[in-house]
Image (cartoon, rainbow, N blue to C red):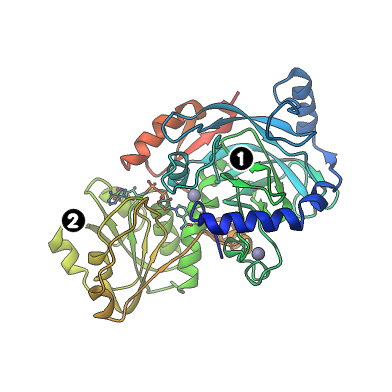
Amino acid sequence: MGRHPGFTLHVARSAWTRLAASRDGVAIQGESGVAHQAPQARDTQRFHASGIDSQADHHPCTEKRMTTTRAYAAFDNTSPLRPFDAPRREARASDVTIDVLYCGICHSDLHQARNEWRNSKYPMVPGHEIVGRVVAVGDKVTKVKLGQLAGVGCMVDSCRECAACKRGLEQYCEKGNTQTYNDVDRDGKTPTYGGYSKRIVVEERFVLTIAEQTKLEAVAPLLCAGITTYSPLRHWKVGKGSRVGVVGLGGLGHMAVKIAVAMGAEVTLFSSSERKREDAKRLGVHDYVVSSDRAQMRKQRSRLDFVIDTVSAEHDIASVLATLRLDGTMVLVGAPENPLALPAFPLLMARRSIAGSGIGGIPETQEMLDFCVEHQLTADVEVVPIQQVNEAYERLLKADVRYRFVIDNATLV
Ligand code: NAP
Ligand code: ZN
Ligand code: ZN
């Protein structure tokens, strides 16, 4: 079955882990390592000598010849994140080594750091909205070159052979994709660690190419918030004249608004408060609705073709369903800790549908990045030093971010 950041059923995961271990663990590890190195990579060799990014064969959970990278990690579901030297595998022939410049803070990082999806493994280095520079490539790498910008999103591998993978829908890999963090590499034993770190090593199929541009910090959130909203908008064929509802104006919500507007849709925003009305108008929203206001909600009845719900916590979806026209669809991308109540009547009264959507495949992520360059779309960001990540989490919980926190990884020393 397909997996998504943290939505794994434990049964599926253990079955997949056994399968992966027997399938390709040994073969992949046996491949040769890095062939070419950029000047930055040579700098790293100096770091090795000075012990900053050192050999870590003393680490309990590593294979030989693994290095460590400076990172921030959650060690349990209640303590603040703190510094950690995360193991990174030695690069294989088809691997790209990336020095992380910026990493977005997604609400999924918080859900998982706090074990709200009940599948967390510690220590956990969150972060799956990664933009950086390529500092080394293996012999077989053709997608990116040394010194180029590169991105990494929520996945770092998949089986690459099932029907979903063949269609470029790696996020729905039948054997389960390998998540950027809080997962296990396809060798069946090595934990994956995310972008709250200095450096990441990724198989080239899962690396995105990023156009040279100035505000890279505003590009990082596209790797999750961008693709997670772009994919369902495309799949349900939103276009010129579509009436689209977006629920929640956070990291995902503000990207959903920007992308839907760029696709030509008329957008109605459902927010839990009045606070973001001015911002929403600036982003191109046509109607702003406070979802607890019954009179405002009544005005939206049976109007919309499509609704994308990005809310991270429990909330009423019945009143939002009622805003869909006959045969309209509401897609859940938000992933609250607890189940949402789904009453039958708003569905059956107008043959409405409710669906879900998980991130996006690698080809579609590249398409989204190109779309964003063409339409000059980036995220609205507040850049923070890594030392403020715990404070950022607290503000995220209060919906107090306009509209994505992004870590400046240069602050990670
Ligand atoms: P975020 O920045 O925290 O935004 C969530 C927004 O939801 C808030 O800004 C707020 O908007 C609204 N909200 C929060 N609590 C609420 C409540 N109690 N009642 C009503 N509205 C509330 O989070 P995010 O990073 O965009 O992520 C949103 C959700 O999507 C998370 O659950 C995340 O795990 C999930 N996610 C899913 C996928 C996927 O593949 N499907 C990918 C990435 C993230 P207003 O202030 O406007 O009300
Ligand atoms: Zn995310
Ligand atoms: Zn697959």
Viewed as shown, does residue 387 lie left or right of 296? right
Instruction: Identify which residue, 302 or 350, lies in the foreground.
Output: 350
Q: Position of residue 22 (x, y in %)?
A: 74, 56
Instruction: Identify which residue, 313 or 190, lies in the foreground.
Output: 190
Is disc 1 surrounded by few (<14), some (14 to 19) or many (20+) residues within 10 Å?
many
- The image quarter containing residue 356 is bottom left
Viewed as shown, does residue 347 lie left or right of 18? left
Residue 292 image label? 2
**What residue type is disc 2 on?**
Ser
Q: Gap between marks 2 and 1, in whole Å?
A: 39 Å
Per the image, label 1 sits on a secondary structure element best described as loop
Q: Position of residue 282 (x, y in %)?
A: 34, 52
Viewed as shown, does residue 388 lie left or right of 347? right
Please name the residue that numbered disc 1 is placed on. Answer: 193
Q: Position of residue 210 (x, y in %)?
A: 64, 50
Q: Which is more N-terminal, label 1 or label 2? A: 1
Q: Mark 1 and mark 2 in contact (Cβ < 8 Å)?
A: no
Quadrant occupied by the N terminus:
bottom right
Can the viewer see residue 303? no
Can the viewer see residue 229? yes
